[in-house]
Image: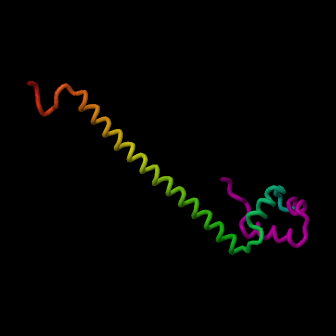
Amino acid sequence: MKRSRFTEEQIIGILKEQEAGLKVSDLCRKHGISDATFYKWKTCYGGLEVSEAKRLKALEDENIRLKRLLADTMLDMVAGSAFWLLSTISAARIWHWLPTHPCQGDV
């Protein structure tokens, strides 16, 4: 995901400018952002203080990290069980197709 060029403090500052009475179109032109970006920020950060926004960002980052950790763990479990199953099936097939048991020798 592309990193924002604005910090949480800057975003909240821009939102507060709009609350103070500036038009959204003028505000977007001034800061070089689209209307869609402004409204997305307003949905995400509207009504938050800077400390709350930082806490929200920290929780989102932690959530992403934990999801990746869970996915890696699940992938390791699936890979390990698939290897065990494959090795078990392969050994069974080898024993099945041998003409005699290796310990018995030719009779």
Residue at point 60%, 63% (across, down): 61
Q: Which residues are magenta?
A: 1-29
Q: Position of residue 58 (x, y in %)?
A: 62, 67
Is 79 above or below relative to 61?
above
Numbered label tally? 0
Residue 71: x, y in percent? 50, 53
User: In the picture provided, is 42 more to the left or to the right than 93?
Assistant: right
- Picture coordinates of residue 45 (x, y %)? 74, 67
Horizontal side of 88 relative to 105 (left or right) equals: right
Q: How is the image coloured?
A: rainbow
The answer to which of 29 and 41 lies nearer the viewer is 41
Corner quadrant of residue 5: bottom right
Position of residue 16 relative to residue 30, above or below, is below
Q: Residue at x 58, y 62 (%)?
A: 63
Q: Which quarter of the rendering shows the C terminus?
A: top left
- Relative to 1, say whether 91 is above or below: above
What residue is drawn where x is 50% and y is 57%? 69
Task: Report whether 90 appears left or right of 26.
Answer: left
Is residue 6 on the magenta stretch?
A: yes
Residue at point 72%, 73% (across, down): 50
Magenta portion: prevailing SS class: helix
- Give the image quarter of residue 103: top left
Where residue 87 sits in the image (x, y, percent)? 32, 39
Residue 46 lies within the magenta run: no
